[in-house]
Amino acid sequence: ATMTDRGILGRDLFEVFPEHPDDPAADGTRDLRASLARVIGDQKYEEIGLGDLGILLFQMGRMNEAIALLEEARALGESISALADAARDAYHLSTIYRELGDGPAEEATLHECLRLAEAADEVSLKEGVLRALAYRAMGARDWASAEAYLRQADEVASSLADAYNAWTAPFAWGFLAYQQEKYDEAERRWEEAYRLAEDAGNIYGALGTLINRGSVLNMLRRAAEGESLLREALQRAQAMDLPDDERRIWEAIGLARELQRDHAGAREGYERALEFIE
């Protein structure tokens, strides 16, 4: 089922399927442990779908095997409930293509995911796919398509009343404004996103928007104000043990110090950022 060799026989299940060390959201082994607990408690067998195994392999960094399993799982969707599973599998597959840098495959899979999500009435997933398509359009500097996808996503989100993820809408609009060098609008959008994330207790959303706000204030030549936000973000990232975010923050702090003509401070910021790369 896992398309691996027989070398895994006799090894501990959670050694074969570990969590992804670079992905704090990875929950594959937690799902497996929960499944085993149900089997032991109920004395009944339980199946784990191909899509779930594909996601496990993705979390392990075994991309080709993950793609094979997720494509097979997606092809099996027939009933409404199976369509929902196929839609989620397609979405996970699109993230793998993005990790691999295969833009055309990612976009094609996102469009298929959108079709499946609509057929299965998976409204929340549909919103996420529309925003993912918007980001792809931004990368191609196709502003009209990006705006169209974001408007569709906002319309879908209006029916969800999902306060925890409400920050994603102004965040995406802020990113579009930033890409178009409309920095004042980007700062305004990200300030709104930060407030929504903070109010909802979404610590990851709040951190991401805080970093972006500090960075865009650098672009607006409000470096001292931006540095203040960035140092607050740095404390949060350190407390949450997010080294990639720490690196980004130190780079932005280096720029902020450079804009304030503090060359020693700028050098410190850039050198601290390099430590995470080395």
Image: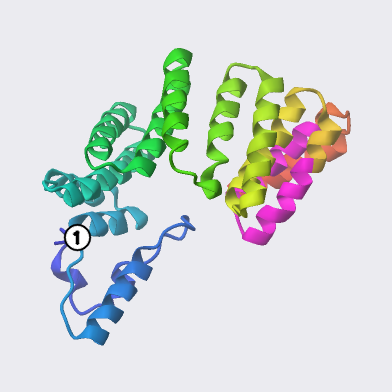
Let me know if residue 67 appears in the view. no
Picture residue at 26% right of the left edge, 47% below the top: 89
Could you say where residue 266 lies in the image, as x and y percent from the top left? 80, 36
Image: magenta residue range: 229-256
The answer to which quarter of the image holds residue 225 is top right
Could you say where residue 6 lies in the image, as x and y percent from the top left? 14, 69
State whether the magenta stretch is mostly helix, strand or loop. helix
* SS state under label 1: loop
Vertical arrangement, residue 247 with respect to residue 9, above or below: above
Could you say where residue 118 lies in the image, as x and y percent from the top left? 26, 36
Let me know if residue 232 appears in the view. yes
Picture residue at 29% right of the left edge, 47% below the top: 88
Picture residue at 37% right of the left edge, 33% below the top: 101
Could you say where residue 251 lies in the image, as x and y percent from the top left? 70, 38
> Would you say 162 lies left or right of 102 here?
right
Give the camera-side residue of 128 and 240: 128
Colouring scheme, one of rainbow, by chain, secondary structure, one colour:
rainbow
The answer to which quarter of the image holds residue 153 is top left
Give the camera-side residue of 143 and 139: 143
Residue identified by numbered label 1 = 49
Picture residue at 39% right of the left edge, 28% below the top: 133
Give the camera-side residue of 186 and 245: 186
Magenta stretch: includes residue 249: yes
Magenta stretch: includes residue 51: no
Vertical arrangement, residue 219 with respect to residue 19, above or below: above
The answer to which quarter of the image holds residue 188 is top right
